[in-house]
Amino acid sequence: MSISVENISKLYGEQKALNNISFKVNKPEIVGFLGPNGAGKSTMMKILTTYIEPSEGQAKVNDFDIAVQKQQVQQSVGYLPEHNPLYLEQYVREYLAFNAQVYSVKKTRIDEVIALTGLTPESHKKIGQLSKGYRQRVGLANALLHNPDVLILDEPTTGLDPNQLVDIRNLIKSIGKEKTVFLSTHIMQEVEAMCDRVIIINKGEIVANKTLKELRDDKEQVVVVEFDYRVEDAFLLKLPKVKQVENTHDFVYEITFSTTDDMRSYVFDFAHDNQLKILQLNQKNASLESLFRELTAN
Ligand code: ADP
Ligand code: MG
């Protein structure tokens, strides 16, 4: 098991940033840690990288205990912090060489991580001269220096422009083929683009832990339809895969289907067969994004 978290809580003074959190991450796997700002993502990541200690609970990284085997945990983990402090006056290679020395990493590894993160054409430049996307690559190269089994990336794609976003996503996906990647984001699209599984956190508590496939399969679909006349609920309940019908007002009905397939054509045919006119026909909750918003609404 690459990451195993059991009943972790973290208090900052009176405030509970994490409330009794448990989850596991396998190897190799790319898991998204998704939640709105302030949910507790960075706090969890700092605990897993031994930067801070939990108030309660246990966690293991690469089977090493974060409380009593800190050094082994640090050797197992590559960490890209949320606001990665880079020295803008330093050259890319100089920065990596300095950290390689600190961590007693062989010099040949510097060229390896530069190549791996696509930094070769920029490696002679000062960090301050690089775009945000390339600075993130420097952060990733640094996290990969000691060839850790587990990568913990705190909002690696935040603040990147669309092209940089695609490049960094691809880079993370390729790293994730061999290593365990645990990355945080507040954007569901990032999870959809990169991750096998998502752990959703809200206000310090886990509200979902599912593969993307499970998340999509579980999803219901709500179709909102307005007819020109009243329809008996029982009538609408004969539609395929229908779960629930609610007459919200006038001749407007919210029909819940237990499928993610677009059911609007069935509703349309139903209206046609029953000589009803449709005044409006819309899908609600069409995306995983809306599911995320529902799960983190409170
Ligand atoms: P996220 O990364 O999901 O945005 P954080 O883990 O940074 O969330 O923060 C979780 C909560 O803990 C927030 O309410 C934040 O204000 C609070 N918090 C984080 N770090 C500290 C700290 N060092 N001292 C006090 N409160 C903190
Ligand atoms: Mg954060």
Image (tube, rainbow, N blue to C red):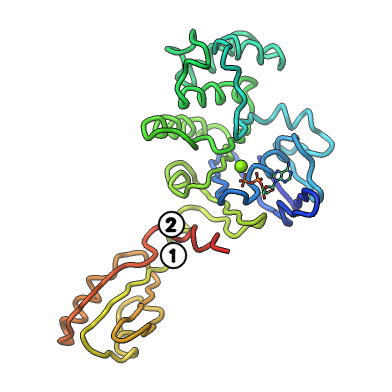
Q: Indicate the quadrant where residue 76 lies.
A: top right
Between circles 2 and 1, the one closer to the viewer is: 2
Quarter holding ligand 2: top right
Figure check: 160 above or below 272: above
In the image, what residue occupies the spot 24% across and 74% down?
A: 280
In the image, what residue occupies the spot 21% across and 85% down?
A: 228
Q: Are marks 2 and 1 in contact (CB under 8 Å)?
A: yes
Residue 221 in percent (x, y) is at: 38, 68
Q: Residues within 10 Å of mark 2 (few under 14, many from 20)?
A: some
Figure check: 274 above or below 69: below
Figure check: 24 above or below 141: below
Residue 99 in percent (x, y) is at: 66, 16
Q: Secondary structure at mark 2?
A: helix
Instruction: Work out which residue is located at the far right of the displayed protein and give it.
Output: 68
Along the line of sight, which residue is nearer the eye, 184 or 280? 280
In the image, what residue occupies the spot 25% across and 72% down?
A: 281
Amino acid found under the numbered disc labelled 2: Leu
In this picture, residue 201 sits left or right of residue 218: right
Q: Quadrant of the C terminus?
A: bottom right
Using the numbered discs, state the Cα–Cα distance from disc 2 to disc 1 in whole angstroms.
8 Å
Q: Secondary structure at mark 1?
A: loop
Q: Residues within 10 Å of mark 1 (few under 14, many from 20)?
A: some
In this picture, residue 243 sits left or right of residue 203: left
Residue picked out by circle 2: 288
Residue 189 in percent (x, y) is at: 43, 47
In this picture, residue 48 sits left or right of residue 13: left
Amino acid found under the numbered disc labelled 1: Lys
In this picture, residue 121 sits left or right of residue 233: right
Counting residues from the N terminus, which is met first, the one under dot 2 or under dot 1?
A: 1
Residue picked out by circle 1: 219
Q: Any mark on residue 38, and which? A: none
